[in-house]
Image (cartoon, helix red, strand yellow):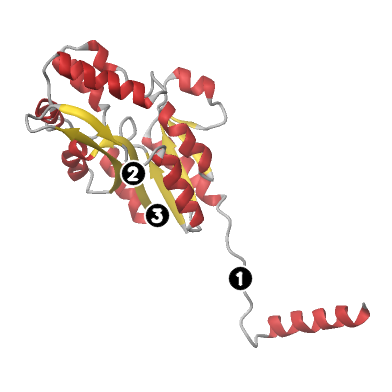
């Protein structure tokens, strides 16, 4: 029983805020979790910038509507889903993700929600769960799944640590330097290889002898003999 947990932005799709920064001409919006490990600080800064420039959710959604998954992402994801269970764990928002999920074949996605007023202005954000990536992986492990996780940023490392196997995918140099314990994949071929390698290390449940089988009867006789010797 195995499940693969993937980050979304930077692994399957481009970084939404970087693309919006480029289209809007606001360089400060290009900061992501690759640069800032404090997610609340990052989001508060984004919301303040949107308010200052009088930009709202419709402006962001208009940019997202023109975005496409990373080259090769859909093929990689389809092949992976054909042989194992996959869930996408992201710190993006459902209000952002819908068009891109359609282009990826609607994989299961756990993420967060935005608080938006009637005028379309982003007023706040609502976490599904604090450190939800790690919490999700922990829950999958409790359900007896062998878990493999892949991500690229600071906000992924707790889920990589919680998983049986963690993989960094196209991470920046600062993340590689701080977390050298994780293998690095530079493309989908390498990521598929690392997932397969981690899959081979999955513990297999012991086989139980069938009731009445000769192997089981022999084991029982040996146990009884040892008991009599004691």
Image position of 4 with respect to 26: above or below: below
The foreground one among 186 and 91 is 91
Frontmost residue, 121 versus 57: 121
> Between 208 and 31, which is closer to the camera in this rendering?
31
Numbered mark located on residue 131 in the image: none
Quadrant position of residue 220: bottom right
**How far is mark 2 from mark 3, CA to CA?**
13 Å
Residue 47 appears in the figure: yes
Q: Are marks 2 and 3 in contact (CB under 8 Å)?
A: no
Q: Residue at x 28, y 18 (%)?
A: 45
Q: Is 134 on the left or on the right of 107, as rendered?
A: right
Tag 3's secondary structure? Answer: loop
| Alpha carbons under labels 1 and 3: distance apart | 22 Å
> Tag 2 or tag 1, which sits nearer the N-term?
2
Percent coordinates x, y for residue 212 in the rendering: 65, 88
First in residue order: circle 1 vs circle 3: 3
Residue that label 1 marks: 207
Residue lying at 46% horizontally and 55% vertically, measured from the top left: 2
Q: Which residue is mark 2?
A: 88
Q: Is residue 70 something one can see in this rendering?
A: no
Q: Is residue 75 left or right of residue 56?
A: right
For label 2, the SS is: strand
């Amino acid at each position: 029983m195995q499940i693969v947990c993937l980050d979304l932005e930077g692994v399957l799709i481009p970084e939404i805020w970087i693309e919006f920064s480029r289209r809007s001409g606001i360089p400060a919006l290009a900061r992501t979790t690759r640069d800032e490990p404090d997610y609340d600080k990052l989001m508060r800064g984004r919301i303040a910038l949107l308010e200052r420039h009088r930009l709202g959710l419709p402006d962001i959604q208009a940019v997202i509507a023109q975005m496409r998954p990373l080259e090769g992402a859909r093929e990689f994801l389809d092949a992976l889903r054909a042989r194992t269970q996959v869930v996408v764990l992201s710190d993006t928002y459902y209000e952002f993700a819908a068009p891109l999920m359609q282009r990826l074949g609607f994989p299961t996605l756990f993420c967060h929600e935005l608080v938006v007023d009637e005028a379309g202005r982003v007023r706040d954000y609502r976490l599904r769960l604090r450190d939800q990536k790690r919490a999700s992986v922990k829950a999958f492990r409790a359900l007896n799944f062998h878990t493999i996780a892949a991500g690229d940023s600071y906000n992924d490392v707790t889920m990589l640590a919680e998983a049986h196997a963690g993989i960094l995918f196209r991470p920046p140099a600062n993340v590689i330097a701080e977390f050298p314990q994780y293998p690095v994949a530079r493309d989908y071929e390498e990521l598929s290889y690392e997932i397969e390698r981690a899959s081979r290390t999955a513990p297999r449940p012991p086989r139980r002898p069938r009731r009445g089988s000769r192997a089981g009867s022999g084991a029982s006789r040996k146990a009884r003999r040892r008991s009599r010797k004691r």
